[in-house]
Image (cartoon, rainbow, N blue to C red):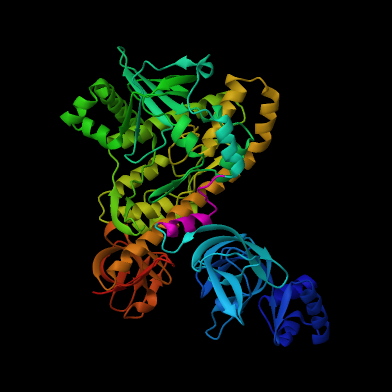
Amino acid sequence: MIERILDIIKKHHTLSKIASAAKMNKKSVLDIIKKLIKDNKVITDGDKFYPVYQGKIEITNERFGFITPLNMDDNTKDFYVSHENFNDAFDSDIVLFYVYKDRNLKMRANVIKVLEHTKTEVVGTFRIDTYKNKKYYSVVSLDYKDSYNLVLDSNVELFKGAIIKCELVYSEHNVKARFIELIGYKDDPGVEIAAIAAVYGFNKDFPIEVKEEVENEIPPTVNEAEIIGRKDFRDLPIITIDGDDSKDFDDAIYVKKEEDGTYTLGVYIADVSNYVKDRSPLDKEAYHRGTSVYLADRVIPMLPRELSNGICSLNEGVDRLVLAMIMKVDVKGKCIDSNLVEGVIKSRHRMTYNNVNKMLNGDQETISKYQDIYQMLLEANELHHIIRKKREAAGSLDFDIDEYSFILNEDGSPKDIIKRTRFDAEKLIEDFMILANEEVAKYMTRLDLPFLYRIHDKPSEEKIAEFLNLVGEKKIKTDREIRPKQVQDLLKSLEEKPDSNILNQLLLRSMAKAKYSEDNIGHYGLALKNYCHFTSPIRRYPDLIVHRIIKELILHPTNYNKALSYYANHLQEIGLSTSTRERNAIACERDVNDMLYAWYMEGHKNEEFMGIISSMTKFGFFVTIDKGVEGLVREDSLQEKFYFDEKNMKYISKYKTYSLGDKVRVKVLDSNRRTRKIDFELSD
């Protein structure tokens, strides 16, 4: 009977209607309701009763947010919650809430209480207030989602306006902040980026125990004893190819075309595991960070500079230890033999993408400067095109989304936004690294040993169906498994459309997210059955783990059973943790870019631009203008009453229809670097 009354309360909220629906007298119903209230399953609000649910609150800004239910029959629906109904909840908290209809009969949520605080730290501005000759210290959050003022529970003597990081200290009735570290001051160049990085837990400084380990145990150069037993590759013209501003080089290549027409491809990867010992302070910190983070004008490295730019970096002209995958590739791009060995190299040249592209395009001055490797680069480029052709035939996906980078002024403000373009040199390195990663994963799969794979699941049937409907694609049937080759053909069919970049982005969003796992389900996007991350151990922890597994289970199995047991029991945890840190790094990079875009557009208020409608929501549509800048045209700013057709992604009024890909002229209404939001209005 209790469950029946609870089901009725989901539809009827007054005692008389509940009793009528249950066909019981009011007193009996009220007795049951009192028990439900005591068990936190029902709440009373005046003379009405509502079911209580658990949910996760996502605060959009200081005015409103949404709650995603965790135990409702339909967990896909989010409920709007206004700031007066937050009830001291912070962004991402787990809360108890109930749902009611407001005066406009719209469904709204009200937080009853917080069950679990997930936020543990806050980054904000240090504030000093004086009352009756006594100083009071507090921190005002810089996060636009949580614009609160928290009392500091420790005395800190800092200058007013300092940007600080604090631990959140929760009690039954309030929350206070405890000072952790100084990030900088509001006028410091780049402090805005440092503050965002601190919010995500990415710190440039390393703990004292890590610094001590580096100082006492990490050598500045390779010694002869370390080379014993390794294959010596120092006589080969091995080179690194990276961006102009790169400082850490964890991969190098060598290519030779053999007389029989096959190619020898050597991919040499920094042997980071030789220096970062399992469960040492250095290793624990690398695991905690999970990845290096690249933010506009800076890198927050996974490893200290003495390793990332020093002993582990394959710098030009110095001996470096490597784990090498040596492959023989035939004229059709198939790897017909491979060998995984420990080695030592001495990089012949530190090449840049820019210089390699110049040489491949016939620039005689650059060719003359690097004459000793010119023929090898021609053969490498030849091999790259063969490998890419094979990858494309298999259905490997290349979304080719426009990417941009920021040029900053000395004060940290954005000076310009530059479109990044990939040419042969960039694609060559990408193809060689993918092949090496695949061959390592194939090797480990054949041995059936515990391993950390890079996996990518097939796309959601529902999401891909929505996209196919949007572009009017009828040939692909979603009631059967969609092969990568079909998605690749779809991408090619979109190339001729003027809004192809936007459609590519929408198709990419319908794809699953790649992650790390001990369970090998293959990599859908690359159309590969076996894949891992092996080629970047300086900046990715999963690659370091892959190196360790290879060494401990294959190359040096001195404690084989112990290592086997450890990896069998811990790879799931490692995969989950490193996947989470990767997502955090991506979100951090996105927030920094959004902040810089908004800052850049602060200097363009009231200016007009031509743009293209790039996405649509029920509260308006986004328009992308020059340099990849995206702003929102709010639904309530439109001159007419529009209906949002979500299925077909259109805004429709009596006289006008706006669709994805439409060109429109917009005016910059507002741009705010703190909220990272840009507002447009239509000016045509």
Q: Quadrant of residue 364?
A: top left
Whether 615 is drawn above or below 399: the answer is: below
Give the side of residue 407 with respect to residue 307, left or right: left
Residue range in magenta is 190-206
Which image quarter is the C terminus in?
Answer: bottom left
The reply to whether residue 413 is visible in this rendering is: yes
How many numbered circles does the render carry?
0
Q: Position of residue 661 (x, y in %)?
A: 30, 61
Q: Is residue 577 left or right of residue 32?
A: left
Q: Is residue 366 above or below residue 305?
A: above
Q: Residue 656: x percent and y percent?
A: 28, 75
Tell me what residue is drawn at x 56 percent, y 83 percent.
102
Decide if residue 441 is on the left or right side of residue 638: right
Residue 316 on image: x %, y %? 36, 27
Q: Check the picture and name the quadrant holding the N terminus.
A: bottom right
The vertical placement of 96 against 297, above or below, is below
Point 34% across, 54% down: residue: 503
Residue 334 magenta-highlighted: no
